Amino acid sequence: KNEVEQSPQNLTAQEGEFITINCSYSVGISALHWLQQHPGGGIVSLFMLSSGKKKHGRLIATINIQEKHSSLHITASHPRDSAVYICAVSPGGETSGSRLTFGEGTQLTVNP
Amino acid sequence: EAGVTQSPTHLIKTRGQQATLRCSPISGHTSVYWYQQALGLGLQFLLWYDEGEERNRGNFPPRFSGRQFPNYSSELNVNALELEDSALYLCASSFGFLTSYEQYFGPGTRLTVT
């Protein structure tokens, strides 16, 4: 079993729909990261969370430390949101630092 | 402010050769992380450098090695290249390491081994 599990693996939505991507992890963490990867490979960090909820524009990320679960929500989705969304966790600390363990990613396609 | 830069963008090598990939972190960042994304596979942690020292390495053979220079730039070396080393190699940088910091990724180097 992977330390970081994401669902769904693939998601197709119509423009304007509300989207949720889920992430569960099984290890102790100091932070959870949501990343976006566009075709060609470039990765952008969307959020880093250790508790609660963060919002940036149409994106919202939440984390429940007790349940070891996080969600990424996209409101009013747009075709430009089409990308792979990756959940990753970092253990923190002197030994492991911010090294990331990644989920397999969710391929999101938003159709106009 | 300049982001994380990597060179070269593409690299084509023959099996058995050595490859050297380079990364320059964001100014002020002391930690550099290397990750591998092989075709059809997820991202995997390779190596972590901070303040010139290798702090941690992932589950990769010793032919994957690297170093960090006094200016915090880093080099990843892959010796005795194998076909399965073909992948996108991403470098990321962050402040320090005692807690989790946001990582900033470079554009990657796509290594093809023929």
Image (cartoon, helix red, strand yellow):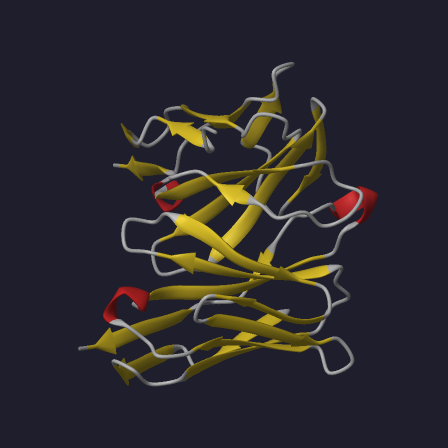
The residue sitting at 80% across, 44% down in the picture is A95
Query: In the image as oriented, which residue stretches furthest toward the front?
Result: A57
Res A2 seen here: no
Q: Looking at the picture, does residue A86 appear above or below residue B61?
A: below
Judge left or right: residue A60 versus residue A48: left
Foreground residue, A54 or A24?
Answer: A54
* Pick the front one: B80 or B25: B25
Q: Residue at x 56, y 75 (%)?
A: A5
Q: Nearer the viewer, residue B63 or A19?
A: A19
**Residue A80 occupies quadrant:** bottom left
Q: How many marks?
A: 0
Q: Quadrant of the N terminus of chain A?
A: bottom right
Q: Quadrant of residue A15?
A: bottom left
Q: Quadrant of the C terminus of chain A?
A: bottom left
Residue drawn at (77%, 66%) of the image: A28
Above or below, A1 relative to B107: below
Whether residue B75 appears in this view of the structure is yes
Left or right position of A104 against B48: left
Question: In the displayed image of the protein, which residue is found farthest to the top?
Answer: B70
- The picture places residue A24, in percent across and down from the top left corner, at 62, 77
Give x and y (percent) for residue B46.
57, 43
Measured as percent of width and height from the top left, residue B19 is found at 40, 25
